[in-house]
Each structure stands twice: as C-alpha cells, then as structure tokens.
Image: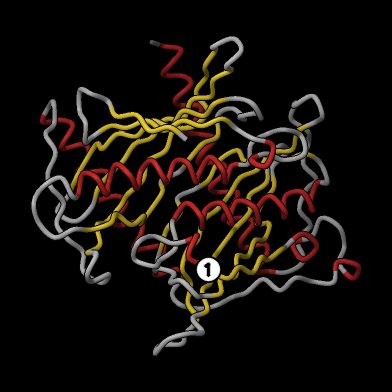
C-alpha cells in the first residue's frame, strides 16, 4: 500500500493506493465491500490522527465513531488499483469529519472510475487515558458557508447517533445459527448467520481497541453470507446505511457479528448487522452492543447483470415490523436518488 500527501495541504488531504488481490474478492472476482470499507477507514484514521497531533499537546489516536451512508457505485475487480482519497472537511471541539472518495484504476488502460463516496466521523482519544477525549485543532475554511454546512452535518449526525444508541440500548439479541433443514427457504431464519471472532493484537489500535475498519469488514462478510444463503447467486454490496459505533471493543474480547434479512425489493435485499462484545478478561466482565448497521446487497448474474431477488417470507409480527421499516428506508433512498437524478439532468 502506498501513501501520498497532497503538497497543497499536508495535514488535511491524503491518498492511499493498493492493488486488489484474489483474497480481496469473492468467487466472481468482485472485491468485497468490507475490503473497501477497511481501506476507507484506514485513510480516515491516518488523516484524523495526524491532524489531531498537528499542534503541541497531549498525543492521541483518532477512533471511528460513525460512518454515514455509503453507496457502492461500481464493483472493483481483482487486478485493479484502488485509490482512496481522504480530506478533512469539518472539525468541532472534539470530532473530525473526513470525506473520502474511492477510485478504481485499470492499470493496463489507465482508465479510472468512481466506486465509492463516504463520510466518517472520528474522535481523538488520549494515548495515556483511553477514556479521555482530547481537543481537535481547528481547520481553516475557504468560505464561511463551508463551516456552516459542516456544523449542520455535525449536529445531524450527533442527533442520529443518539437516537440509534437509544434504540439499541445494551440489550443483547443474538442471532442463533439455526438448523437450516428445519427452516423454509427464503425466510429470515433460513439465511440468518453469525460469526464469532476473538479480538487479537493485529485487530487493534495503539490503545488495544479494535480498528473500525476491521469491524466493518467482518460485518460485511456476515451480511454477504446472509445474502448468498437467501438468493444462492453472486452478490455484491450496494450500500451501507450509517454505521454507528456505540462502544469500544477491547483486545481479548469475543465478538459475535450477527446478520438477518429485514427487507427485499425486486432487485435488492437489506440485511441488519450488529456486533455484540463479550468481555471475558479483566475487572469488568460484561456483554454489550458495540456496533450496528444496515447493509444492502444486490444479486448479479455471471455476466454481472442484476438478477431478481427472491422475496422474503414473513413468519411473525416482529419480522413484519422490521420489513415495513426496511421498506420505508428503501423508498426514502429511492426518492432521494430520483431527486438527485432530476437535478443532474436539469443542470
């Protein structure tokens, strides 16, 4: 992986690049969404940590707090080079907003295309006291309007993070891997899946807490398993709703990443994924909800064309409620895209 600083602003923009290998992709050669998310988070963590240590004061490491909705505009393939460009666009007293663009380059033709846009929020944690959030050095804005727009985004994400945390609480609702032979195909119980992972040193930051990118990669893997079990075709990540990191996950914890189908449209499927941490070592032994998000997948043919998605069979009132909520998110996103398309055609 290579790292490049923009000479015009050495602390506010960076680019990392690396070639996509076979172990980054699925059997069809499409790079896993989790691999891209991990690269995005790495770029954000580097630029945020560098900026937060740009002035004299207490040394810190930037920790991921939230990833806004991320759309996968085009699949990346084995052999292409992924270029991840990250820029700091807003700072509050205790947080940093980073906006990221991902480009895929065909190194044989030099052709490039945009594959992802993402917005991430980080908070700086003291190296000597992980529970202490340090202050963020301010950035200079080209126009006053940019600062005001950034402040609005900051207030909105702060409110949404609080609402999501209230909805999740600390209630543990594990997805138990069922005996699929007793479940009807296309039901929630048939495709739901869980992955158990022991957090090791290679997963962690200097603080001994899990990298946000590692967690997102595992979440995408579980969501992909659910999607494959549901439709039994090649699947790719289409988008990820806001990923909220409610609590840190410490080295030595056992984490359970669980996924279940919530909604299907004709050509997409929404999968709820949550991460529960089980602290077995240390003074405080507890279980808690650490991360939650909704992933959207699409089914593709061997030629890479969209395929119809089998409709989800609802078995009880709880599943019906989750389906209707997912339908609401789907229609809201569809409306936003239609408005954006209309705006572009009118320009």
In the rendered image, which residue does mark 1 sit on?
199
Residue 113 in percent (x, y) is at 52, 19
How packed mark 1 is, by other alpha carbons closer than 10 Å (few <14, some 14-19, many 20 or more), is many
Q: Considering the numbered disc 1 on the image, is that residue within a helix, a strand or a loop?
A: loop
- Report the residue at 54% width, 20% height from top: 105
Task: Establish if 249 lies above or below 295.
Answer: below
- Report the residue at 59% width, 42% height from top: 33
Task: Establish if 204 lies above or below 35.
Answer: below
Farthest-out residue, right: 181
- Is 57 situated left or right of 83 in this image? left
Task: Establish if 82 lies above or below 190.
Answer: above
- Is 132 situated left or right of 103 in this image? left
- Report the residue at 63% width, 49% height from top: 270
Residue 31 in percent (x, y) is at 64, 36
> Residue 319 sits in which quadrant?
bottom right
- Report the residue at 45% width, 50% height from top: 242
Most foreground residue, 126 or 181 = 126
Which quadrant holds the C terminus? Answer: top left
């Amino acid at each position: 992986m290579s790292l490049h600083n923009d000479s015009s602003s050495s602390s506010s923009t960076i680019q990392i690049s690396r070639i996509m290998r076979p172990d980054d992709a699925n059997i069809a050669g499409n790079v896993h969404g989790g691999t891209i998310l991990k690269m995005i988070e790495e770029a954000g963590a580097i630029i945020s940590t560098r900026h937060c240590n740009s002035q004299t004061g207490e040394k810190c490491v930037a920790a991921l707090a939230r990833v806004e909705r991320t759309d996968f505009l085009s699949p990346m393939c084995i052999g292409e080079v992924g270029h991840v460009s990250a820029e700091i666009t807003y700072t509050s007293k205790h947080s940093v907003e980073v906006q990221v663009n991902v480009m895929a380059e065909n190194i044989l033709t030099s052709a490039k295309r945009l594959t992802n846009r993402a917005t991430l929020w980080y908070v700086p944690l003291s190296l000597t006291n992980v529970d202490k959030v340090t202050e963020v050095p301010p950035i200079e804005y080209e126009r006053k309007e940019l600062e005001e727009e950034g402040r609005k985004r900051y207030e909105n994400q702060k409110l949404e993070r609080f609402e999501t945390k209230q909805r999740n609480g600390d209630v543990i609702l594990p997805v138990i891997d069922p005996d699929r032979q007793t479940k009807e195909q296309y039901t929630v119980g048939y495709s739901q899946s869980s992955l158990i992972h022991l957090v090791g040193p290679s997963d962690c930051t200097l603080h001994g807490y899990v990298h946000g990118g590692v967690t997102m990669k595992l979440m995408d893997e579980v969501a992909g398993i659910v999607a494959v079990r549901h439709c039994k075709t090649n699947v790719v990540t289409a988008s990820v709703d806001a990923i909220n990191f409610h609590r840190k996950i410490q080295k030595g914890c056992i984490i359970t990443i669980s996924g279940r189908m919530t909604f299907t449209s004709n050509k997409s499927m929404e999968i709820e994924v949550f991460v529960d941490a089980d602290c077995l070592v240390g003074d405080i032994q507890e279980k808690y909800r650490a991360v939650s998000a909704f992933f959207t997948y699409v089914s593709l043919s061997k030629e890479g064309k969209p395929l119809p998605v089998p409709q989800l069979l609802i078995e009880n009132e709880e599943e019906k409620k989750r389906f209707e909520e997912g339908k609401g998110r789907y229609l809201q996103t569809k409306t936003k895209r239609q408005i954006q398309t209309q705006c572009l055609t009118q320009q």
